[in-house]
Amino acid sequence: MQPPVADKRPTSTVIHGHTRTDDYEWLREKDSPDVTAYLEAENAYTQERTAHLADLRQSIFDEIKARTLETDLSVPTRNRGYWYYGRSFEGKEYGASCRVPVADPDDWTPPRPAEDTDPDKPALPGEEVLLDLDALAQGHEFFSVGGSAVSPDTKLLAYSTDVVGDERYTIRVKDLTTGELREDEIVGALGGATWDRAGENFYYTTVDDAWRADKIWRHRLGTTQADDELVHHETDGRFWVGVGRTRSDRFLVIASGSKTTSEYRYLDADSPGDGWQVFAERREGLEYSLDHAVVAGADTFLVLHNQAGPDFELGTAPIAPTPAEEWQPLIAHDPAVRLEDVDAFAGHLVVHQRSQGLTQLRILELGEQGVDDDYLVEFDHEVYTVGSAGSPGFHQPVVRLGYTTMAVPSSVYDYDVRSRELTLLRRAPVLGGYDPADYEEHRLWATADDGERVPISIVAKRGSREAEGGGTGPVPTLLYGYGAYETSIDPYFSIARLSLLDRGAAFAIAHVRGGGEMGRRWYDEGKLFSKQNSFSDFIACARHLVDTGWTTPDTLVAEGASAGGLLMGAVANQAPELFAGVVAGVPFVDALTTMLDATLPLTVTEYDEWGNPEADPAVYDYMAGYAPYDNVAAADYPPILAETSLNDTRVLYVEPAKWVAKLRATAVGRRDVLLRTEMSAGHGGVSGRYKAWHDRSFSLAWMLDRMGLAGRGTAVGP
């Protein structure tokens, strides 16, 4: 079967004196029969070219399924007199959200069902099904819940759903007493709803034509959407908005933020007549967040901010509009520790921070005079990830923690702040005789072109590197990267990944600049005019794995998605000889075209990340130097698998479609390029766990084929 050939229909634009000709911009016409026909032809070609992997795909799917406890229950979380939890059922895609009443108000030990609980019966006595997600998804090719929130009196549930994949949700309200839906319905919302303390109104967010969250609305129960009150409209195109409620329930907050600047408004439920007040007016470059706590017996605003330094400081302020100069330090700025978030409770604070590339949880015990103690929750592994795992109660004495490594499955703990006792509540089961001790994890360090040390997290089956005659030898390796928005790709466990590891491959994460793994500096040195560092860091990590004997270019596969897809496109242009294959998911590969068009979704809000090439010739020249689509050359590229979704509103399908078309027309040598488009999905891909397993099995089978491991099997024990 011959690959599809996209027509060349050149269009030219002149920007800053440069003439830019694009042969494939016509593929942007989503509703055009020609575009649909081209995408379907690409899908057919991809299926034909990967038909020999059908058995392997099925084997991987079967392995994921065999390792997963399909009928299961999450650890219940306590809130307002109920234990809330999710259930999954064998053979069903989505599961259900449920609750049971708290039996003993003084007992914070979450209930657990019997091991042999019948999936057709309640898991716990008094179980109430809040949402049957499979019933809601019936008849829809795609289904996603944007959020759900129980009213303060626990009698109503506001929830939102998306059945297209474009992340425009419909909010509905369910009466939990009768099980009936109320007439209230909100269309076109972004995410879920936030109740006020009285439970008579809820707040929600909508987007503008550029898919920027710009408006906050108040809906009064029993009225129509047309009657809703516009509470806040953010008119600056660089800013987006969101609404929430403090854990203490006293304040509603509206956050306005760009990539570099913050502004918060608050509404005091104790003094609603004061209306919404701006806490600290926006000042270019000043970022902060706002929460409510009681410190030394006084109501206090907690302010996590970068006024004192780029890695943030935790400060306090009175319950009143307060300029940054008057914030008092509670945890002073430390350039070796990046403070990322704070959770406020009645008797303690939980600070999320990172140091030397690792996440940490810091506890501040509060007393009558302020902070009585300040310490870290300690863990033993060399490479791990820890964070909060749901602690909605302001007065609760325990902190729910989530913990994982690349070999240790996701684990849920309760930490008693006063006794300092850490209790393992549950470790996600992995069926088939899985043992974390069968795998080895390491933190490696590569050296970038400018001398910067770049961390790599890596995991492999123990013994997979043993060479004949002693010593170690190379193994096929998947190297994953992202590198944008200060998003850290911290070590994590994956059942699907075991199908790689058990066939003899290693999995590595390149923690490149542009992410936040090493603090704010790490992010600043991987964006705007320093974006090339992200690409150079990833290439340095790949070279390090080769030079130190972990792998070889013939068996090294690279993967990244979204902004990580831009990373994939750039490294494929700059170092194609290093990789045996490249997987680019929903890839931001036509970055220059997107950033030149302020009418496209999210472009204006992205100026602080990438720059504004339309307004600044220097930005145009810099982006033109790395944008993957613009730099496709007559080179021998490694095999490439590009995966996208037709209804993606974050990275439009047209970017990978154009990229693949240009690669086919321009590249020399192998020209082994595949495009796979999900025709009923969004940025996160298909919905439903079985669909997601099939989707991941497709990608993993292609990777194993590139690594030379397609013929190697693996067994899952009983």
Image (spheres, grey):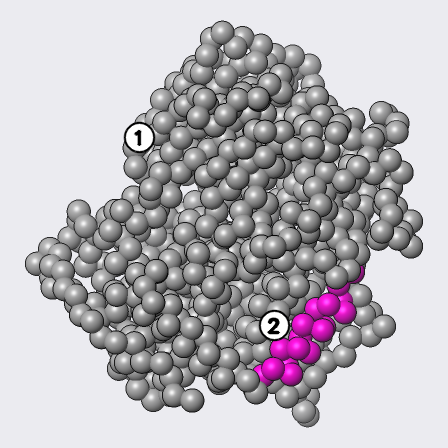
Q: Is 385 located above or below residue 158 in the figure?
A: below
Which is more toward the observer, 634 or 128?
128
Image x and y of residue 220, in percent? 54, 20
**Quadrant of the rendered structure where residue 213 is?**
top left
Q: Which residues are magenta?
A: 53-69
Q: Are marks 2 and 1 in contact (CB under 8 Å)?
A: no
Residue 166 location (% of width, % of height): 46, 50
Q: Quadrant of residue 513?
A: bottom left
Residue type at tag 1: Thr
Question: Can you tell which mark lies on residue 697?
Answer: 2
Which residue occupies the foreground of this view, 491 or 500? 500
Please name the residue shown 25% across and 65% down the image.
25
Q: Is residue 638 visible?
A: no
> Is residue 111 shown left or right of residue 178?
right
Cα distance, mark 2 to mark 1? 44 Å
Lower sequence index among marks 2 and 1:
1
Residue 43, placed above or below residue 618: below
Q: Is residue 104 magenta?
A: no
